[in-house]
């Protein structure tokens, strides 16, 4: 199935000379998944709400300095007849929920994650949330400042954070959209003379004032079809995973990106490895990454790897011209999820720091399960006495 019937010609569009303040307001008023930026009527790039949130650029700056091709995470260019699975992979690897669609070299429209999920929802009843959710959860507390939430969103490359109260129970969710919305509202209340200290004031606003509540939740045994339908119906980018009958305890998170990633799983004999921000690879290739992770996985023979996601993120800091890179590796296996993360100057260095942590986690899991099997064998023998 290709995307020709689900791509849309309806999209928000601004010129490269448009002020960032106006673009931020556009996100607040119309809630688009992304905005196409043009130069003299020709496609120039895409800007997402998360890009604006991560920026310290003043509202008077032009959006042309902030579009994706000039930054990390360039939005992929999609051909109108591309296969839906390939497009899902490109959105995941491009770190975007919207991408431009071209036909005969000309901008035709856009394709969104929502359009893809809506088109395949009837086929998602065979998957459960437990098979694809993220179990490593980053949270913030109600009293934390928005500045802390922004730092965690940036550091972990996510768009939402569960919020917990003083007892550690789930009380809300804060997203990039929530933070952008409150920032725009407070900025609009300020006069021109007051805006010099406005940014610092916004950073101190408690997360409680920005979070959304009640929270959209799902359980491990729910089907992905049920979860996606809930996300689309309620316009959620993700759901918090909680135990059955207990919507106060955070078990994990399921996002639209998790579902897109599952759609693009392959059945190749080689390990399925997806890389977000692949353009940051410098002295290593996708094959090098796959081979290195395969060597780690092979150290635990009973472990079957179902999928691996590697994410690179570039920081502003540099050493002799080489940027500081954060690498995150998440591996889904029949023995559970395992992960490793690390930082280094250059993607190669960062990847191997993360790989070393992943290897330690794999070997630790192997030892834990071996101990459990040994205890089980001992108990069975004692039961025979």
Image (cartoon, rainbow, N blue to C red):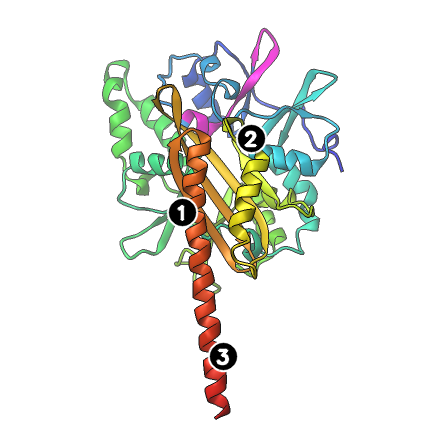
Can see residue 122?
yes
Q: Residue at x 51, y 30 (%)?
A: 31
Assess whether mark 3 and mark 2 are in contact (beta carbons under 8 angstroms): no
In front: 106, or 185? 106
Q: Nearer the viewer, mark 2 or mark 1?
A: 2
Q: Residue at x 28, y 21 (%)?
A: 190
Q: Residue at x 30, y 52 (%)?
A: 165
- Element at label 2: helix
Q: Which image quadrant is residue 232 in?
A: top right
Mark 2 closeness class: few <14, some 14–19, many ≥20 residues within 10 Å: many
Assess whether mark 1 and mark 2 are in contact (beta carbons under 8 angstroms): no
Distance (Cα) linking label 2 and label 3: 48 Å
**Which of the two discs, 1 and 3, labels the residue nearer the N terminus?**
1
Label 3 sits on residue? 377
Using the image, determine if residue 57 lies above or below residue 213: above
Residue 268 x %, y %: 69, 46
Label 2 sits on residue? 94
Query: Which residues make up the magenta segment?
Result: 38-52
């Amino acid at each position: 199935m290709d995307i020709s019937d689900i791509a849309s010609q309806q999209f928000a569009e601004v010129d490269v000379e448009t002020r960032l303040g106006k673009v931020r307001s556009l996100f607040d008023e119309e809630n688009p998944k992304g905005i196409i930026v043009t130069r003299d009527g020709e496609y120039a790039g895409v800007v997402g709400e998360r890009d604006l949130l991560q920026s310290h650029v003043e509202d008077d700056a032009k959006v042309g300095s902030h579009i994706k091709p000039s930054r990390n995470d360039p939005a992929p260019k999609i051909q109108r007849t591309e296969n839906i699975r390939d497009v899902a992979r490109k959105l995941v690897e491009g770190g975007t929920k919207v991408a431009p669609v071209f036909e005969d070299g000309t901008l035709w429209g856009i394709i969104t994650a929502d359009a893809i999920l809506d088109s395949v929802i009837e086929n998602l009843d065979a998957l459960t949330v437990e098979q694809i959710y993220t179990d490593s959860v980053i949270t913030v507390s109600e009293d934390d400042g928005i500045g802390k939430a922004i730092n965690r969103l940036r550091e972990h490359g996510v768009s939402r954070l569960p919020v917990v109260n003083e007892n550690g129970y789930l009380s809300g969710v804060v997203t990039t959209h929530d933070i952008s919305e409150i920032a725009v509202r407070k900025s609009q209340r300020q006069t021109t003379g007051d805006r010099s200290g406005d940014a610092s004031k916004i950073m101190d606003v408690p997360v409680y004032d920005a979070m959304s509540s009640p929270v959209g939740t799902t359980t491990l045994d729910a089907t992905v079809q049920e979860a996606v339908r809930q996300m689309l119906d309620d316009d959620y980018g993700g759901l918090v995973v909680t135990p059955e009958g207990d919507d106060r305890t955070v078990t994990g998170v399921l996002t639209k990106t998790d579902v897109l990633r599952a759609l693009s799983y392959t059945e190749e004999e080689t390990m399925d490895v997806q890389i977000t921000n692949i353009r940051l690879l410098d002295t290593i290739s996708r094959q090098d990454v796959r081979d290195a992770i395969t060597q780690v996985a092979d150290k635990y023979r009973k472990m079957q790897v179902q999928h691996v996601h590697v994410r690179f993120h570039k920081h502003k800091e540099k050493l002799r011209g080489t940027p500081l890179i954060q690498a995150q590796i998440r591996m889904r296996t029949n023995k559970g999820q395992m992960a490793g993360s690390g930082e280094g100057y250059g993607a190669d260095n960062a990847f191997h720091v993360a790989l070393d942590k992943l290897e330690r986690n794999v070997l630790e899991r192997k030892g834990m399960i071996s101990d459990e099997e040994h205890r089980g064998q001992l108990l069975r023998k004692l039961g025979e006495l």
